[in-house]
Image (cartoon, rainbow, N blue to C red):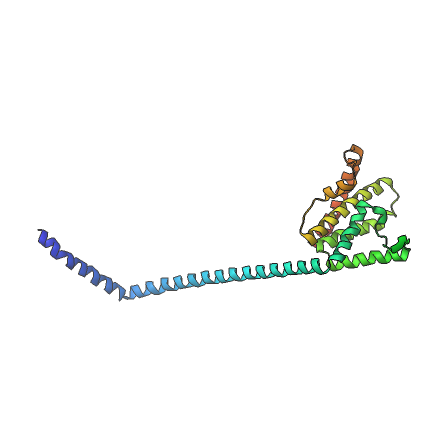
């Protein structure tokens, strides 16, 4: 009985092997091979293409980041004096408003209106050249508000615009500092350096109204661009 099993095993294997090769040589196998072979090839080509596109995008991002870092480094090193002038000038709106827009002349000479006007133009030119899109947007709102303040007679509106001017100046200085140094600070921290009575309820309410008005102006301008 055991001998029969041993002798029949090779016959069974040979029969299975013969059937397998017959199937390989059949038309059905060829059809299956072609069908799934092309499918596998198509999937492989698609995966390779996706990987290639992803690699190209990563290279492009790295290239752009490198260019951006180089550009920022160039502006910061080659034009440090000009950048400092812009930040310093707009910081005066908060720290010393009487000196904002005034030409800096030697020997305590009092600047003329024309000299002050040229000084403002020079600062604007520097801002246009070196300022980011967001910085220029805020500066434009701030200057429009500054130009119009003398035209307003209502005391409540003047107070609102005065506090809005403070907040816009703080926003601008914050943006410029971030653009040029990469350091991010809160506008409120700049405001606190100069204004010490924000704990007073009356002053706090006025500041809140001005801050909300300034933020509303910024949002309106941003909405126009979207």
Q: Position of residue 208 (x, y in %)?
A: 76, 39
Q: Position of residue 96 (x, y in %)?
A: 83, 46
Q: Is 40 situated left or right of 12 in this image? A: right
Q: Is 66 situated left or right of 185 in this image? A: left
Q: Position of residue 225 (x, y in %)?
A: 70, 54
Q: Is residue 148 above or below residue 114?
A: above
Q: Residue at x 30, y 64 (%)?
A: 29
Along the line of sight, which residue is nearer the eye, 141 or 124?
Answer: 124
Q: Residue at x 40, y 64 (%)?
A: 41
Instruction: Write down the quadrant of residue 127 in the picture.
Output: bottom right
Q: Is 17 situated left or right of 178 in this image? A: left
Q: Residue at x 76, y 42 (%)?
A: 191
The tally of labels here is 0
Instruction: Write down the quadrant of residue 112 in the picture.
Output: bottom right
Q: Residue at x 36, y 62 (%)?
A: 36
Q: Position of residue 114 (x, y in %)?
A: 89, 58
Residue located farthest toward the front when viewing the structure as drawn: 107
Along the line of sight, which residue is nearer the eye, 184 or 79?
Answer: 79
Along the line of sight, which residue is nearer the eye, 68 or 36?
Answer: 68
């Amino acid at each position: 009985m055991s001998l029969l099993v041993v002798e029949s095993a090779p016959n069974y294997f040979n029969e299975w092997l013969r059937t397998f090769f017959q199937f390989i040589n059949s038309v059905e196998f060829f059809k299956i091979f072609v069908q799934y072979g092309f499918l596998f090839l198509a999937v492989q080509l698609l995966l390779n293409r996706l990987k290639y596109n992803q690699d190209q995008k990563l290279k492009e991002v790295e290239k752009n980041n490198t260019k951006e870092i180089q550009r920022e480094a160039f502006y910061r090193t080659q034009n440090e004096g000009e950048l400092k002038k812009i930040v310093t000038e707009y910081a005066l709106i908060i720290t010393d408003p009487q000196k904002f827009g005034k030409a800096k002349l030697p020997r305590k000479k009092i600047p003329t209106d024309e000299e002050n006007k040229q000084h403002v133009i020079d600062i604007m030119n520097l801002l246009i050249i070196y300022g980011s899109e967001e910085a220029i947007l805020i500066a434009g709102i701030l200057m429009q508000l500054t130009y119009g303040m003398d035209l307003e007679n209502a005391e409540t509106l003047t107070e609102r615009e005065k506090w809005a001017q403070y907040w816009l100046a703080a926003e601008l200085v914050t943006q410029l500092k971030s653009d040029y140094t990469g350091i991010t600070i809160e506008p409120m921290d700049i405001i606190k350096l100069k204004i010490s009575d924000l704990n007073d309820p009356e002053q706090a309410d006025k500041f809140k109204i001005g801050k909300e008005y300034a933020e509303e102006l910024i949002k309106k301008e941003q909405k126009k661009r979207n």
